Image: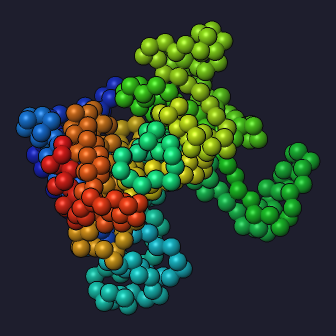
């Protein structure tokens, strides 16, 4: 395939056959630098990954990185923060990883992609003075990647690293992965203003069909959850548990109230599990009704929990859970709540996946005031790269990165954010390092 700006280097294009990725020894993987601190964390991530791959495989394997452009770089290369060519290149390469991108949040008509300042005119930025980064207000780049590539699974691993200050006394038992459905539920965007023709029509229809009266001054949202959407997110969660040798998958829902959306999510999830993974799964009902609570070796336990109760259980007995599958809104809440258990989003990795395309990402913002200072914590993007290596089944390299990062934190060689927290808890052995220095500390401890 020919591209205008993207230069595909020599290497192995990733294939997809019989439901599996086909990955050679020199896979070509897209990398998007991101805006703001992407300038700092993305090169550090690449350095750590390259060294882990070299160490794990003695030079027999190598990632061939190819730069892709969005955000500020997209504006410079294409005149657009979200170029069509970048979307097509990710689809073509099948795996990419990206730094954070600017997301406008106010009502202003223009935003600067250098410093994230928002204003009501084009031209030079009123804050930083640069004249090559201001563009029209736009919708979230992250969301558009998910929509254009149909990345239906938002995947968030959450785990504790010894030495990170945490408010929860069971934080050291936290190690699970959240699979959040990305396209339905509230993310479908069926939200209608109070008094609008659509809202009033829905109110009238519900009254006509059910006799129920909704107040006329109500905004109306429609919450679609389909068999199709449910099955593919549950399938993805089960496949991950199977590939990574994890012991359980938990379906989280509010089916006691919303029986035909979230209740059906659970019902359809169990049916999918039995139909496609029947040889490796055991339902919780079968575990107690037929097996006296004794879990067979090598099997995956499939269970379900009410959404509100799971927020208690991840705080009081998190080690009972290894993989969660949830509709969109529940997954959104649980992801951030779980990150708080282990010390916040700074070390939170993430990915958005379809069956054959995966885009790994830093889960934090662009922090433009730190751009180019070689200061911020690159841990989120580095751990997202660990997810990428696991996705490729290069688990040996992934383990080296996790071990190196864990030892760096344990020994107190950390960036300023963690150093401040550790010192606040009374540690006197902390060595504050730069963004790239943290990368080197990880490499030295692999």
Coordinates of residue 444 in the picture (x, y in percent): 14, 48
Q: Position of residue 377 (x, y in %)?
A: 31, 61
Q: Residue at x 52, y 38 (%)?
A: 318
**Image side of residue 314 versus residue 44, left or right:** right
Answer above or below: position of 108 versus 233. Answer: below
Q: Is residue 282 left or right of residue 29?
A: right
Q: Is residue 239 above or below residue 307?
A: above
Q: Residue furthest left?
A: 59
Q: Is residue 53 visible?
A: yes
Q: Taking 165 as reference, is 131 above or below it?
A: below
Residue 138: image location, x then y, percent:
45, 71
Direction from residue 77 to residue 319 in the image, left or right: right
Look at 23% across and 45% down and name the residue there. 404
Total labels drawn: 0
Counting from the top left corner in percent of width and height, residue 65 is at: 18, 51
User: Which residue is painted at 40% across and 37% down in the image?
Assistant: 355
Residue found 45% across the figure and 50% down from its top? 342
Name the one closer to the observer, 181 or 318: 318
- Regarding residue 405, the answer to whether it shows in the image is no
Q: Is residue 106 above or below residue 183?
A: below
């Amino acid at each position: 395939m020919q591209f205008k700006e993207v230069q595909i280097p020599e290497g192995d294009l990733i294939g997809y056959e019989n439901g599996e990725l086909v990955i050679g020894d020199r896979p070509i993987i897209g990398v998007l630098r991101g805006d703001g601190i992407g300038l700092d964390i993305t090169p550090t991530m690449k350095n750590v990954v390259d060294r882990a791959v070299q160490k794990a495989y003695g030079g027999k394997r190598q990632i061939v990185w190819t730069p892709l452009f969005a955000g500020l770089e997209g504006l410079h290369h294409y005149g657009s923060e979200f170029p069509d060519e970048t979307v097509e290149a990710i689809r073509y390469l099948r795996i990419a990883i990206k730094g954070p991108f600017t997301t406008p949040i106010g009502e202003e008509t223009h935003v600067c992609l250098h410093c994230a300042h928002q204003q009501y005119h084009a031209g030079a930025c009123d804050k930083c003075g640069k004249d090559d980064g201001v563009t029209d207000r736009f919708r979230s780049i992250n969301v558009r990647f998910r929509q254009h590539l149909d990345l239906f699974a938002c995947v968030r691993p959450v785990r504790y690293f010894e030495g990170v200050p945490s408010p929860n006394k069971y934080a050291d038992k936290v190690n699970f992965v959240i699979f959040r459905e990305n396209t339905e539920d509230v993310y479908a965007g069926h939200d209608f203003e109070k008094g609008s023709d659509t809202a009033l029509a829905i109110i009238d229809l519900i009254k006509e069909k059910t006799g129920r009266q909704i107040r006329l001054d109500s905004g109306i949202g429609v919450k679609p959850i389909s068999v199709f959407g449910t099955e593919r997110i549950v399938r993805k969660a089960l496949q991950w548990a199977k590939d990574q040798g994890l012991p359980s998958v938990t379906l989280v829902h509010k089916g006691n109230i919303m029986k035909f959306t979230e209740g059906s999510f659970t019902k359809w999830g169990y049916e999918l599990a039995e139909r496609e993974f029947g040889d490796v799964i055991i339902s919780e009902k079968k575990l107690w009704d037929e097996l006296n609570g004794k879990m067979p070796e090598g099997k995956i336990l499939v269970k379900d929990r009410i959404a509100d109760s799971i927020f208690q259980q991840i705080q009081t007995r998190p080690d009972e859970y290894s993989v969660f599958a949830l509709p969109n809104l529940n997954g959104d809440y649980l992801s951030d709540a779980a990150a708080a258990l282990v010390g916040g989003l700074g070390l939170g990795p993430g990915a958005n996946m379809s069956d054959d395309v995966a885009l790994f990402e830093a889960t934090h913002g662009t922090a433009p005031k730190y751009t180019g200072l070689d200061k911020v914590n690159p841990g989120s993007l580095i751990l997202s790269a660990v997810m990428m290596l696991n996705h490729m089944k290069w688990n040996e390299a992934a383990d080296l990165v996790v071990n190196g990062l864990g030892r760096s934190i344990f020994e107190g060689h950390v960036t300023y954010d963690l150093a401040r927290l550790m010192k606040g808890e009374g540690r006197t052995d902390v060595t504050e390092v730069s963004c790239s220095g943290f990368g080197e500390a990880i490499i030295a401890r692999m």
